[in-house]
Amino acid sequence: MTHVVTDHCEQCRYTECVTVCPVACFRGDGERLFIDPDLCVDCGACVPMCPVHAIVDSFDLEDDQQIWLDVNARRSKELPTVRERAMPLPTAAERRASLGH
């Protein structure tokens, strides 16, 4: 299958994950990142890089998180590729703390 960026990325937009992606499957807007499922090779290199645990294997999505499969697929077709690390959003530290990470 593929890996998926969940709602934990919202208000964070940490980009450490894009630096290890071998196929540049990350897309992004000003708020968060998405994974293009057509490009993801399911290597999992990005998972431990996310400080808010926003990236999960699609097999591990809870029922109420299944929506992120469609959101990532749709939004990744509309957005530019993110290949380089960038500063997280100003709200990232607060969001990270609220998620318990």
Image (spheres, helix red, strand yellow):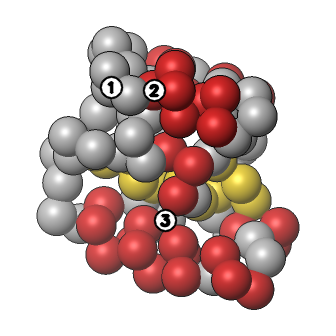
Q: How many marks?
A: 3
Disc on res. 76: none
Q: Secondary structure at mark 1?
A: loop
Q: Secondary structure at mark 3?
A: loop
Q: Residues within 10 Å of mark 1 (few under 14, many from 20)?
A: some
Label 2 and label 3: CA atoms lie apart by: 25 Å
Q: Residues within 10 Å of mark 3 (few under 14, many from 20)?
A: many
Q: Position of residue 55 (x, y in %)?
A: 64, 48
Residue at (33% x, 25% y) in the render: 89
The answer to whether the residue labelled 1 contacts the one labelled 3, judged by CB atoms less than 8 Å apart, is: no
* Residue in the foreground of this view, choosing between 35 and 10: 10
Disc 2 target residue: 92
Label 1 and label 2: CA atoms lie apart by: 5 Å
Disc on res. 89: 1
Relative height, residue 61 to residue 13 (above, below): below
The answer to whether the residue labelled 1 contacts the one labelled 2, judged by CB atoms less than 8 Å apart, is: yes
Which amino acid type is shown beneath numbered disc 1? Leu
